[in-house]
Image (cartoon, rainbow, N blue to C red):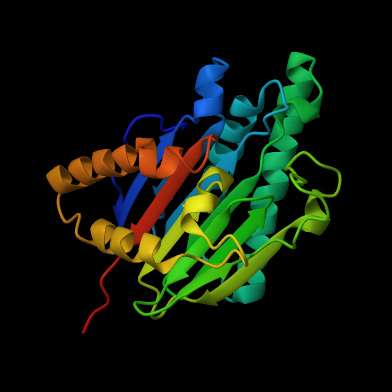
Amino acid sequence: MTAADPQPALESGGWRLLAASQRGRAHVSRNQPNQDAWLAASRLDGGLVLAAADGAGSARHSQIGSRIAVATVVNTLTGSQVPTDADGARSLVIHALKTARRVLGAEARRRGHSVRDYASTLLMCLVTEKAVTALQLGDGALVVHDGTALTRLARPPTARFAGETVFLTSPEALDAVRIDCIPADGVTGIALLTDGLEPVATSLGNGDPFEPFFAPLFAFAEGAADDALQASRSASLQGLLASDRVTSRTHDDTTLLLAARSLPG
């Protein structure tokens, strides 16, 4: 879904999720749609799947490509068996990425378009009882919190040229993808964000997560303990993305998924 409006939070295995997406000023001025998309779902085993994508601004149908990408990834990961180890988790998220590439190719052929018309980045996170597995292709960021420190997972290499991005539909996508798998023990927060939010959420110098941005937001998500609070706090998150605090720093679409939980003891 494009989530241009606040969406209900999801609770799965103790995780509470808030998510919002805002069309950027540049797209508003050009009468273009929000090209970001996000989707989240719970697994039958109590796990969680998160995905976000940012359609390429130069691609004619990128808003469709980003929607297809996140829907395919979430459907693939929610229907899979629980991976037994890190290698299995890595194989599973790569399988989801390859499936999304195939589905985009089939959509392009069906409509008589170039697959490049559906270009988008891809962020995904598979959360099981034992592990958090993150995959990133292109720009954006995946951040985890352990209650004390923030860590950026699956960070892509620094681009050779400004604005250079590898997309899901790029021939070199499988070589450019980055994956990290860490133990789930101790992880209390997970965030996925598209690149429009990076100027606000990460350090301009080294790209590290900006603690004053994330810490209150993870606490905010964790406190969404019932349906009324979840709806209210999702709307508040939407308001943050639409505020001058964010829109004065970026003209791009912005999307943010926040998953948070309290650990026993």
Residue 165 vertical placement versus 83 (above, below): above
Depth check, front residue: 247 or 93: 247
Position of the C terminus, as image quadrant, is bottom left
**Residue drawn at the location 66% of the way across and 65% of the way down:** 179
Is any atom of residue 8 visible in this view? Answer: no
**Residue drawn at the location 69% of the way across and 50% of the way down:** 138
Depth check, front residue: 74 or 188: 188
Q: Where residue 222 sits: x, y (%)?
A: 25, 62
**Residue drawn at the location 23% of the way across and 46% of the way down:** 233
Is any atom of residue 112 visible in this view? Answer: yes
Residue 129 vertical placement versus 124 (above, below): below
Total numbered circles: 0
With 262 as the anchor, is 53 left or right in this view?
right
With 72 as the anchor, is 174 left or right in this view?
right
**Residue drawn at the location 79% of the way across and 28% of the way down:** 115
Q: Residue furthest right?
A: 171
Q: Where residue 50 sits: x, y (%)?
A: 47, 52
